[in-house]
Amino acid sequence: MDNNGTGSKFKVNEGVSQFELYMNGRMAFLEYYKEGNKIFMTHTEAPAELQGSGAAKELVKKALEYSKENKLTVVPSCSYVAHYVNQHPEWRKVLSDGYQM
């Protein structure tokens, strides 16, 4: 787990195909599946206690960093991930070719 100084911890849980962010005793998660070198990010969810805390935003950023470091091409099948990338165009370079924002 990575503790980034904000009191949150990020984990890649390959057993259930999700990225996890632990903050204030709660977990937000981002489900994914892989096909070859593509990673499809399919669903982001944060408990009510973490909504508005920036947890989902941090979770998506960490998942994108993981994907970039592991040379995976991202397919944002989740509307939250697509919205995040739209708001942070520096991440468009990790998207699948032909993906339109």
Image (spheres, grey):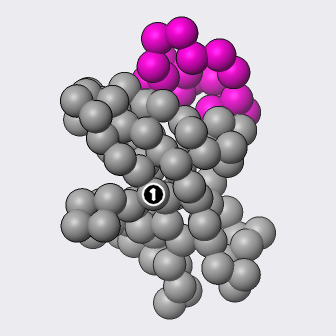
Please rate how many residues cluster around mark 1, counting C-alpha atoms within 10 Å: few if below 14, some from 14 to 19, many from 20. Answer: some
Whole-percent x and y of residue 17? 32, 59
Question: In the visual, does 39 lie left or right of 100?
Answer: left
What amino acid type should be assigned to the residue bearing mark 1? Glu
Q: Nearer the viewer, residue 30 or 3?
A: 30
Q: Which residues are magenta?
A: 85-101
Q: Residue furthest top?
A: 98
* Residue in the picture at 67% in, 47% down: 80
Vertical arrangement, residue 20 with respect to residue 49, above or below: above
Q: Looking at the image, how many numbered discs can be counted on the residues?
A: 1
Residue 79 appearing in the image: yes
Q: Is residue 93 magenta?
A: yes
Residue 6 appearing in the image: no
The residue identified by callout 1 is: 31
Q: Is residue 95 magenta?
A: yes
Q: Nearer the viewer, residue 40 or 50?
A: 40
* Residue in the picture at 52% in, 48% down: 42
Q: Residue furthest right?
A: 52
Whole-percent x and y of residue 67? 34, 38
Whole-percent x and y of residue 27? 50, 78
Vertical arrangement, residue 71 with respect to residue 24, above or below: above
Question: In the visual, does 21 lie left or right of 39?
Answer: right
